[in-house]
Image (cartoon, rainbow, N blue to C red):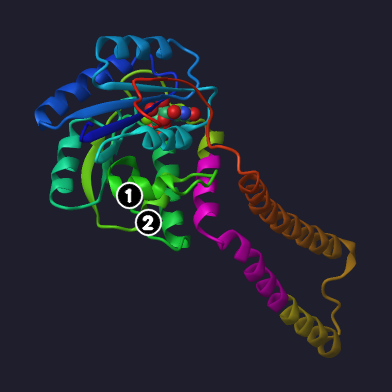
């Protein structure tokens, strides 16, 4: 049994896999621990699956591969990696080398000191568009502000988790997964380590704007009722405002003789405004309802096509 499992989700990363393997083996050799690299093929359409087979053939002692039947998404791929990892500690890392494998040594150091979760904080980001930086930064701050758990700022999934944390997360079979939130939720002794997030080694981001928004929404709805409560707050606010407006209009009509808020335009604007507020509220309820529906179906999180090097019932 290896001591350290390194889990990397792979979706069309043909240009990165060899370098990833190279750098991880160097780092792990330096660490002196026994290790395995668990690669999850998230339905790649490029040459990645063939490269992963090659890697497994050349180093069956360290490489494990799980092939998904289709693309299930990054968070599900990471979850599958945790399900199949055998180590006493599990490190989650992106396959595109944005998270430098050398940082694993720092993570291991803190783990040996007794921390059960060591997360890597993006102190600096290189080579990402200003749009990505701003949206990411904004997202972490909004999430931090409205959720009930304290999710560390500017922290992705690059982290080390002790076996006890991995077991806890794996026992949570929710469909809409937001791993970094789930790790904060389980607790244990946690600590951050700063690092510089690099540019992608090769290829481009697999997180389209659509995937990013879905991910952000999963994070928010998974850990907060705030969007639901917003309808209540807005309702009270508008009720207060209209009560005030009624008094003002009565006063103006009775004592000044002016005729304020006349005509169809005013009515139309108010009707459209309230109509849209109601539709938005309904939409938010719908979002939560859809998520409940997804959970109720209790489908497996992912479907595996094939496994290489995975031992036992894992
Ligand atoms: N990834 C995945 N499935 C997906 C999208 C991404 O397994 O549907 C993997 C991808 O191969 C990479 C990691 O998740 O190893 C992070 O993705 P990416 O680098 O595209 O995200 P970014 O770093 O731009 O946020
Ligand atoms: Mg990346």
Viewer-nearest residue: 296 or 222: 296
Tell me which label, 1 or 2, sits earlier in the chain: 1
Look at 66% across and 73% down and name the residue there. Answer: 237
Mark 1 and 2 residues: CB-CB less than 8 Å, in contact? yes
Eyeballing the image, is 87 above or below 12? below
Q: Magenta segment range?
A: 213-241
State the residue lying farthest toward the front: 312
Locate the C terminus by quadrant: top left
Which disc is residue 179 wearing? none
Eyeballing the image, is 17 above or below 40? above
Q: x, y percentage for residue 261?
A: 83, 71
Q: x, y percentage for residue 133?
A: 39, 40
Query: 10 Å neighbourhood of mark 2: few (<14), some, or many (≥20)?
Result: some
Mark 1 CB within 8 Å of ligand 1: no
Viewer-nearest residue: 311 or 212: 311
Q: Judge left or right: residue 146 versus residue 200.
A: right
Look at 85% across and 65% down and name the residue there. Answer: 267
Q: x, y percentage for residue 17?
A: 32, 17
**SS under mark 1:** helix
Q: Judge left or right: residue 197 versus residue 299.
A: left
Viewer-nearest residue: 181 or 165: 165
The residue that label 2 is drawn on is: 186
Mark 2 CB within 8 Å of ligand 1: no
Q: Is residue 260 at all visible to an observer of this figure?
A: yes
In reply to whether residue 268 is colored magenta, the answer given is: no
Eyeballing the image, is 280 above or below 85? below
Label 1 – label 2 distance at C-alpha: 7 Å
Q: Is residue 154 at all visible to an observer of this figure?
A: no
Q: x, y percentage for residue 138?
A: 43, 49
Look at 45% across and 43% down and name the residue there. Answer: 135
The residue that label 1 is drawn on is: 165
């Amino acid at each position: 049994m290896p001591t350290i499992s390194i889990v990397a989700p792979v979706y069309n990363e043909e240009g990165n896999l060899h370098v990833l393997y190279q750098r991880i083996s160097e780092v792990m050799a330096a660490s002196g621990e026994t290790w395995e690299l668990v690669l999850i093929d998230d339905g790649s359409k490029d040459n990645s699956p063939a490269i992963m087979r090659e890697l497994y053939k050349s180093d069956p002692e360290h490489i494990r591969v799980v092939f998904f039947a289709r693309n299930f998404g990054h968070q599900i791929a990471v979850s599958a990696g945790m399900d199949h990892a055998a180590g006493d500690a599990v490190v989650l890392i992106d396959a595109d080398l944005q998270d430098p494998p050398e940082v694993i040594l720092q993570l291991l150091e803190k783990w040996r000191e007794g921390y059960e979760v060591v997360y890597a904080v993006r102190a600096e980001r290189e080579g990402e568009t200003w749009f990505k930086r701003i949206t990411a930064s904004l997202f972490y701050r909004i999430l931090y502000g409205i959720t009930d758990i304290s999710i560390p700022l500017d922290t992705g999934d690059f982290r080390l988790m002790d076996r006890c944390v991995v077991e806890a997360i794996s026992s949570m079979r929710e469909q809409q997964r937001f791993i970094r939130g789930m790790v904060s939720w389980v607790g244990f002794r946690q600590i951050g380590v700063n690092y510089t997030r690099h540019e992608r080694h090769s290829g481009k981001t697999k997180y389209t704007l659509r995937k990013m928004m879905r991910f952000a929404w999963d994070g928010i709805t998974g850990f907060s009722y705030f969007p639901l409560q917003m309808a209540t707050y807005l309702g009270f606010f508008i009720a207060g405002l209209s009560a005030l407006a009624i008094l003002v209009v009565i006063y103006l009509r009775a004592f000044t003789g002016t005729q304020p808020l006349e005509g169809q335009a005013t009515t139309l604007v108010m009707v459209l405004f309230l109509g849209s507020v109601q539709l938005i509220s309904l939409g938010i309820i719908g979002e939560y309802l859809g998520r409940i529906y997804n959970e109720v179906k209790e489908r497996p999180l992912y479907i595996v096509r094939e496994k290489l090097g995975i031992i036992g019932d894992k």
